[in-house]
Amino acid sequence: MRRIAVLVAAAAMAAGMVSCTSDDAKDSGSTTTPTGAAALPASETAGLIPAKAWRARQDDYLAFASGQDLDPGSPLSLLAHATADERAGKEPDIDQATVADFQPIFDKLEAFEDTGDFDINNLLFLWKQQHGHLDPDLAAAVKERILAFKYWWTEPTPKGIVDNQYYWTENHQVIYLANELVAGETFPDETFTNSGMTGTEHVQHATERLEKWFASRAKFGFSEWLSNVYWSEDMKGTLLLAEHATDPKIARLASMTLDMMFTELAGHVQQGTFGSTHGRTYQKDKLNGRDEDTFSTAKLVFDNTPIAYPNADNATLLATAATYRPPEVTVKIANSADTAVFRTKSSLPLDPNAPVDPDVKAPLGTTFDGEDGLMTWWGLGAQFPWQMVPNSVATVKEYDLFKTHNFQQASALEPIVATSDDAALQALAHSLATQVNPGLLSQVDTYTWRSPNVMLSTAQDWRPGQRGEQDHIWQATVDPDTLVFTQHPSVDVSTADDASDNNSYWTGDGAIPRAAQHENVSIAIYDPSYAGDGGVGSGAYSFTYQDYTHAFFPTEHFDQVVQRDGWTIGRKGDGYIALWSARPTEWRTYQKGQFTRDLTKDFDLVAPGGPSNVWITEVADASDYAGNADPFDSFVEAITATKPKASGSALCPANARCLQAGLSVTYDSPSQGELTYGWDPAKPTADQVPFTIDGKDQDLHPDGLRWDAPYAKARFDDGTYDASLGGATLHLDFTKGTRTTTR
């Protein structure tokens, strides 16, 4: 794996090799900050959000966060209140927080419960920024937990403890390693009580692995693509490094990675909502933009929604940051009124259904072996593909992972693992590949069309027919309240207190659709590649799914809703969304105690009759029909005049215990012409009905691109990124460790 070069030493930074331009002095300029410099110059820097404007946005958020009652048991609340006091010229008043207030956090850490890395991250921010204002006993207790934490799965676990922490997804990796590096730098000569290592030794351990993590993100992007949950966590880890790492190289890579994320986020927000396809999301985050873990952060950076901050959350860390500022070009992209398409390619290719090959080689210079293999492939949820079976089995055995919470779903495999060799286990993994890889986040191509009033986003032809866990394949978005998507549930309606489970009613897919989009039109074809049991049972590995697909269409958040000829069509302001189902649809009636997110009118549009279906979506702006007396009526007439045609024996009766045979569809779009598409899980990829526009095949997986938008360009497996809009630019070169910005 290519190592990131260091071009200029830290001494060069001290000697003043970096130029910066004050936005008070003039409104344009350029700065190139080599690796080896501090995370960012303390002065205002050309090409970033102007310092005064950024401080105003930070202070606006802090006014909201500190306007809430101080929670003495919340590090984020203490940070918000203390920073607001400091910026108002007051002495921070947070010493009333006690050890007892923090005891729930300490108990969780001492029990080795999952997401302890999130808590240590918050404690490190608090320590680095405000520990001098804490009660001395609490400060000592925080330091004690930092020194006692288990920072990597290879460290020992105390006797009698089951370590339920999950170390391997890409967001956990960067948080664990960022925590380790900053903790080690902060206490270099201390002995960390869990590992027995010194702080300096922890820094060495973390640095090597962070360089690999940053190199992978630079070349391949994020496997948890466009996640409105886990990008918030990725930002926690990278921001800790950008703000507090004393290693200038690591701090610079962290700032550059944040820039990359904010540019990508900027091209996928609509009225403040991260309304794109997502690699990972939950029922709790996807039914309203306000519920997204990224909403407050996007509002803070882009300032593109009048909606008030809904939560004081991880955005607090960015609002209290003293060093990192996002590039101005990201603000321009997020607020652009131009209609544009943003295409991305992320993650690594891996097909668990490919024939077993004992001599298989990992792609793109990666490996399936050792710790590097675990960081790469477990980082994208590839525990069970046959290619990773030897390494996965060895790791599960070595660290006794079947006892942990995160592997209990697969614990039924423990006797088989104990008595089978690698070849037999690889054959078993191959035979169950469609069902047992619900969390696999293999390479994805996304397509997002955004106009001033509506956005449509799709993961193109990604793992069709296979089981999915937290994937979110497509979405149409007008604003935080008004969004539409379809899904094939693996379980039935959730109870009111079951909003965030991995397998909730609205989370993931019993079978992922074969989906494709061109401009403002998308098609999603559902047809499982494996036989379900009609929804009997539950769990990611029970091979169940429901005998219907459904759509989230919250009627009370639209100004108008029309249903006609199989179409459900809604208007919110000047944004229009039309949705068609090949199967007849009906609104689900909810009972008391079922999860509705407080919606009181129809929102769950069910297509009963079987798990296979075709859904078509077309979106539009009022301006597209502006020549008519009533643009929405004209849109409705144009849409309903079309007669989509879906065919195939896959439209089988409900409760049919059979492998579905396939579907094809033709749609004569009023805006894009005739679209055709198909999906048959019994056929190989080469024999599938292609996605065509007026008879011309569309390339759903273009080679080489990482970003492709009018304002953002990057090549896959390259490490360089460019964004430009309205005179503001960003150039990132991870191969040289340089960052250039102008405005």
Image (tube, helix red, strand yellow):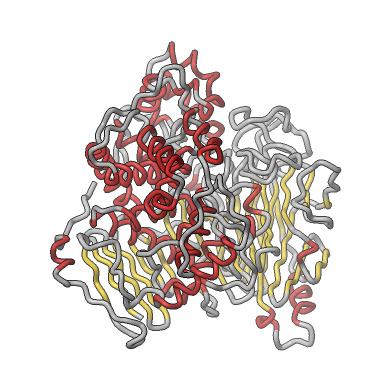
Q: Specify the quadrant that holds the C terminus.
A: bottom left
Q: Kindly identify the residue that appears in the image at 69 percent across and 32 percent down.
A: 658
- Could you tell me residue 524's position as x and y percent? 63, 54
Q: Nearer the viewer, residue 614 or 81?
A: 81
Query: Where, by quadrant of the figure, is residue 49 drawn?
Result: bottom left
Q: Kindly identify the residue that appears in the image at 76 percent across and 79 percent down.
A: 634
Q: Kindly identify the residue that appears in the image at 41 percent across and 32 percent down.
A: 355
Q: Nearer the viewer, residue 493 or 324?
A: 324
Query: Where, by quadrant of the figure, is residue 426 drawn?
Result: top left
Q: Looking at the image, is 387 positioned above or below residue 200? A: above
Q: Kindly identify the residue that appears in the image at 79 percent across and 62 percent down.
A: 555
- Could you tell me residue 236's position as x and y percent? 44, 52
Q: Nearer the viewer, residue 575 or 549?
A: 575
Q: Report whether 414 appears left or right of 473.
A: left
Q: Report whether 110 appears left or right of 622.
A: left
Whether residue 227 can be seen here: no
- Could you tell me residue 42's position as x and y percent? 30, 69
The tally of labels here is: 0
- Could you tell me residue 22's position as x and y percent? 32, 81
Query: Where, by quadrant of the figure, is residue 452 drawn?
Result: bottom right
Q: Looking at the image, is 301 positioned above or below residue 660? A: below
Whether residue 342 can be seen here: yes
